[in-house]
Image: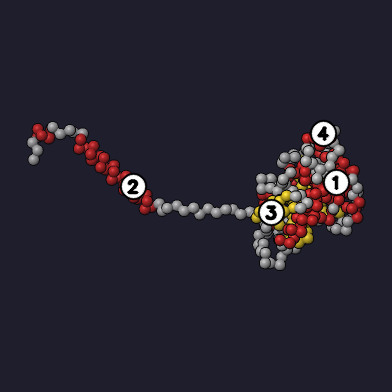
């Protein structure tokens, strides 16, 4: 037994600190052990969200490979006998218009909406839209500013002779086709409509850049369109666009209206054109709303989908 004086010689803080340290160590390892027991190892169960497929076509007409972003409708099976309409989308890169246009198609496929028939969407990824979407211009300033322009003839040949046969052979596509183009893409869609209207059954032309080459396309003949026996539906949508980027003033919504009137003058009973003015939208914002409206107008009832 310690004598009282011996007890007094012991550091009064020594023993409590050792006890506290011991308790801390025991508590830490107990907590760690408990945590390991109650939190099993986390596993990574994340998966890629697949919206469609990426395909590639070697083009002789364009002398290059082109990327295709393709949305396949729900229930699509290669072994089935069902064939689907195809919607061809200009400016169809993943970081351009492909994702939200495919979304609009998918939305309108819902059974409780059933507005647009289940369709394949082919987004043609952009390489050089000024080269591919414009015909030769006589405006010297534009030739200098955009030296690659003026080769829409090659791109149209690519669509007709390579792209459409490729899609119809590889995918379960029927002969019904829709073309969507905005801005310079709308210019190209208009050129195809005037020169080779039977390439598509439906044309969705949005904010077309008809100002190109001083709006010379509006002066071109529509004899082919006038004589076509194919049922062709055309939607022309335009927002509050204002003046075009030209030295000679061109008002884009006015020229879109002139395009509509030019098509109406063909008086072809097989050709139907709809003009849609969206004053709350501009050149940057119009596409999504206009395509939604186009689907509503071009597919007016669910009976068209059966």
Within 10 angstroms of label 3, few (less than 14), some, or many (20 or more) residues? few
Whole-angstrom CA distance, mark 3 to mark 2, is 56 Å
Whole-angstrom CA distance, mark 2 to mark 4, is 76 Å
For the point 81% across and 43% down, which residue is it?
A: 150
User: Which quadrant holds the N terminus?
Assistant: top left
Labelled disc at residue 260: 1
Disc 3 target residue = 56
Within 10 angstroms of label 1, few (less than 14), some, or many (20 or more) residues? many
Residue 160 drawn at (x, y percent): 80, 55
For the point 13% across and 32% down, which residue is it?
A: 9
For the point 78% across and 60% down, which residue is it?
A: 175
Disc 2 target residue = 31
Whole-angstrom CA distance, mark 1 to mark 3, is 35 Å
Q: Are marks 4 and 1 in contact (CB under 8 Å)?
A: no
Q: Secondary structure beneath disc 2? A: helix
Q: Earlier in the sequence, mark 4 or mark 3?
A: 3
């Amino acid at each position: 037994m310690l004598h009282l004086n011996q007890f007094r010689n012991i550091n009064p803080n020594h023993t409590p600190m050792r006890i506290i340290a011991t308790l801390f160590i025991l508590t830490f390892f107990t907590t760690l052990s408990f945590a390991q027991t109650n939190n099993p190892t986390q596993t990574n169960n994340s998966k890629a969200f697949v919206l469609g497929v990426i395909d590639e076509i070697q083009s002789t007409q364009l002398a290059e490979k082109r990327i295709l972003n393709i949305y396949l409708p729900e229930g699509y099976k290669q072994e089935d006998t069902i064939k689907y309409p195809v919607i061809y989308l200009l400016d169809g890169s993943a970081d351009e218009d492909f994702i939200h246009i495919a979304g609009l198609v998918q939305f309108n496929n819902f059974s409780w909406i059933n507005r647009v028939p289940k369709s394949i969407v082919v987004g043609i990824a952009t390489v050089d839209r000024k080269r591919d979407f414009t015909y030769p211009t006589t405006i010297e300033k534009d030739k200098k500013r955009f030296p690659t322009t003026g080769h829409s003839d090659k791109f149209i040949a690519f669509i007709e002779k390579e792209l459409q046969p490729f899609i119809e052979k590889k995918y379960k596509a029927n002969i019904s086709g829709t073309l969507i183009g905005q801005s310079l893409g709308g210019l190209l869609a208009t050129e195809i409509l005037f020169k080779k209207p039977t390439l598509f059954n439906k044309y969705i032309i949005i904010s077309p850049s008809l100002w190109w080459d001083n709006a010379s396309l509006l002066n071109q003949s529509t004899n082919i369109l006038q004589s076509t026996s194919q049922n062709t539906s055309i939607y022309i949508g335009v927002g509050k666009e204002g003046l075009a980027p030209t030295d000679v003033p061109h008002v884009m919504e006015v020229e879109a209206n002139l395009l509509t009137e030019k098509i109406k003058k063909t008086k072809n009973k097989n050709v139907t054109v709809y003009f849609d003015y969206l004053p709350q939208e501009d050149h940057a914002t119009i596409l999504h709303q206009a395509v939604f409206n186009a689907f509503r107008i071009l597919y007016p009832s669910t009976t068209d989908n059966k």
